[in-house]
Amino acid sequence: DLWTARGHVRFEDVRFGYSDDRIILPDFSLDIPAGQTIALVGTTGAGKSTLAKLVSRFYDPTKGRVTLDDVDLRSLHPKDLRRAIVMVTQEAYLFSGTVADNIAFGKPDATLDEIIAAARAVGAHEFIEALPDGYGTDVNKRGGRVSAGQRQLISFARAFLADPAVLILDEATASLDIPSERQIQDALQTLLADRTAIIIAHRLSTVAIADRVLVMEHGRIIEDDTPEAL
Ligand code: ATP
Ligand code: MG
């Protein structure tokens, strides 16, 4: 049977540094109820990406623990972890292969109908259909080239299809053209529904749709409030 996570994430007295002589998170605690959307903001080097890497288990804490539904991430089966927690990176990286392959990455048994449904959900279907070979377009071939905004939408479709309990998004800093910025925002709303989300936010519009905004500085949370209050 497949284990389905609810998406309750907690940092319990976490200490972490990439090396022993430079601690990035000295003593970090944070409770994220299932379904909540967190916007994480703060100065460069504050530890935002480090936090994201601990949730996706790129790294483990030196002390303390990170839990999902009260289970230490280290105790989870890697397969369950990969299904429950998905990170969408800043580069919205595309793999060599077709657009369909790229959306189905992480769920290779997906049918074309499911792939199209995911693309439709995040508003990517129209531009994909307009590509030379539609969903069969090789993203690395001439003519298959997609813009930064479109790459982002493809990676959103991938995350939507994977349907994780917890989504981590390191938002792109690169500026997108206005229509796609708007499209990305709409797609984001759809993508965030019914799951826990931690977004390292660079856009004000993203901060505005969060349930809660955390401001980080030197590995600590210095503000924790609703977007309206901040
Ligand atoms: P930004 O807004 O620039 O992305 P950030 O808040 O995401 O910043 P982190 O990437 O978490 O910051 O970095 C926190 C600190 O950890 C920084 O001092 C950084 O230099 C250091 N750091 C990040 N990654 C590594 C690494 N792989 N090895 C060693 N130190 C690292
Ligand atoms: Mg970062």
Image (cartoon, rainbow, N blue to C red):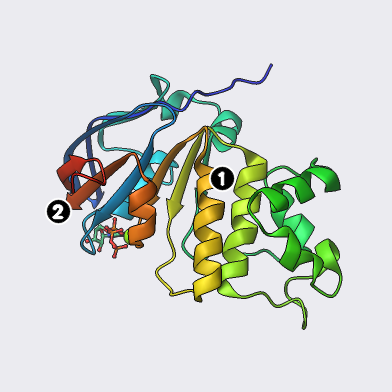
Q: Which residue is mark 1?
A: 190
* Residue at image point 30% right, 29% down: 65
Q: Which residue is mark 2?
A: 218
In the displayed structure image, the side of residue 209 where residue 63 appears, left or right: left
Q: Nearer the viewer, mark 2 or mark 1?
A: 1
Residue 40 rendering spot, x and y as whole percentages: 30, 50
| Quadrant of the displayed image that contains ligand 1 | bottom left
Name the residue type under label 1.
Thr
| Res. 23 in view | no
Residue 61 rendering spot, x and y as whole percentages: 30, 38
Give the quarter of the image for residue 136. bottom right
* Residue at image point 63% right, 52% down: 122
* Residue at image point 67% right, 63% down: 95
Q: How many marks?
A: 2
* Residue at image point 15% right, 44% down: 223
Name the residue type under label 2.
His
